[in-house]
Each structure stands twice: as C-alpha cells, then as structure tokens.
Image: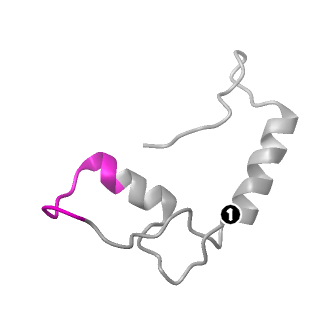
C-alpha cells in the first residue's frame, strides 16, 4: 500500500519543494529505523496493519540505529 506525503497537488504533480523534501527525507532515513520491537504482551498475533507498521518503521531491523 504505497503512501505519498505530502499529497499530490490538484494538478497531480508534487510541488518542487515537496519533491526535494521527499528525496532528502528518503536519503537521510534510508539507514535508520523509526522504532524497534522490544517485547510484546499477550498473544502473539499478526494483522495487515501491524505488518505494514513494522515494515514501514523497520521495527524488526535491530541492526539499524534508531533515527
């Protein structure tokens, strides 16, 4: 499920500033994780939302530093 932020302008094009911001963000965040899974309580379960969260935040990449 791809996500685009900021949302495209009405013309369907991202503004030049937003495009630059996205490129810079992606370059700087490529080698870090947003969170790390430390532990969980209760039953071990999976859901598509949880999987998406873990994938986009790189929660299982404990080798990456937190950004």
Instruction: Name, please, the residue furthest toward the front.
Output: 41
Q: Quadrant of residue 11?
A: top right
Between 29 and 15, the residue placed more toward the observer is 29
Instruction: Name, please, the residue furthest toward the right.
Output: 17
Position of 7 compared to 43: left or right?
right
Q: Quadrant of residue 41?
A: bottom left
Position of 39 compared to 12: left or right?
left
Between 17 and 67, the residue placed more toward the observer is 67
Q: Is residue 16 above or below residue 42?
A: above
- Residue pictured at 74% horizontal, 63% vertical: 27
Q: Is residue 65 above or below residue 59?
A: below
- Residue pictured at 41% horizontal, 53% vertical: 53
Where's residue 18, x and y in %?
80, 37
- Residue, disc 1: 29
Q: Residues within 10 Å of mark 1 (few under 14, many from 20)?
A: few
Where's residue 6, x and y in %?
68, 33
Write down the region rendered in magenta: 41-51
Q: Is residue 17 above or below residue 13?
A: below
Where's residue 56, x and y in %?
48, 56
Quarter of the figure with the N terminus: top left
């Amino acid at each position: 499920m791809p996500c685009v932020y900021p949302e495209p302008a009405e013309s369907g094009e991202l503004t030049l500033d937003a495009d630059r911001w996205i490129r810079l963000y992606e370059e700087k965040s490529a080698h870090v994780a947003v969170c790390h899974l430390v532990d969980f309580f209760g039953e071990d379960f999976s859901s598509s939302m949880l999987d998406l969260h873990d994938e986009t935040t790189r929660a299982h990449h404990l080798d990456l530093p937190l950004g």
